[in-house]
Image (tube, rainbow, N blue to C red):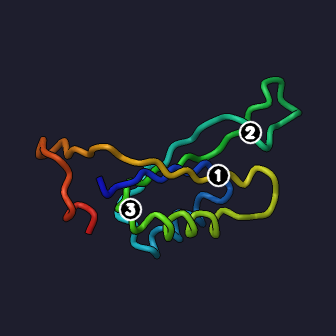
Amino acid sequence: MPYRKVTAIINTERLEDVEAALQVMKVSGVSVSQVRGYGEYHNFYQSDMMCSHARIEIFCQTHKVEGIAHCIMNAAHTGIAGDGMVAVLPVEQLYCIRTQSKWDEECFS
């Protein structure tokens, strides 16, 4: 299937810049949620070491992945530990709930 899921975990302070950059790129759909966790960077001042981050999820055509990933990285980059990460996963199938059918190419135009 020619679709991918781009998931980015970024610093919440950079979220508005990333959203604006994705809008300029005309990305057709974005989901954002607040998450907590730790990885490269964690908060030693809290007993559970967890930090707040924003998770961005985008389903897109395969040929758009590189541009979207670089867009997110450029807008979220500060050069400081905790900037985040971008993961790209294959998508086996997409369905449209409204039409109860398989997603087609025109949905990503």
Q: Which residue is depicted at the point 46% across and 50% down?
A: 57
Quadrant of residue 108 within the rendered picture: bottom left
Q: Position of residue 82 (x, y in %)?
A: 76, 50
Q: From this viewpoint, which residue is outermost toward the top?
A: 47
Which mark is drawn over residue 76? none
Q: Which residue is mark 2?
A: 39
In which quadrant will I find the C terminus? bottom left
Q: Which residue is depicted at the point 66% across and 62% down?
A: 76
Q: Which residue is depicted at the point 41% across and 48% down?
A: 90
Front-most of 96 and 1? Answer: 1
91 relative position to 88: left or right: left
For mark 1, give the secondary structure.
strand
Q: Amino acid at mark 1?
A: Met
Which mark is drawn over residue 62? 3
Q: Which residue is mark 1?
A: 85
Q: CA distance from mark 3 to mark 1?
A: 19 Å
85 relative position to 107: left or right: right
Q: From this viewpoint, which residue is outermost toward the front?
A: 1
Q: Amino acid at mark 3?
A: Thr
Q: Amino acid at mark 2?
A: Gly
Q: Position of residue 72 (x, y in %)?
A: 57, 63
Q: How many marks?
A: 3
109 relative position to 46: left or right: left
Q: Which numbered disc, 3 or 1, marks the residue closer to the eye?
A: 3
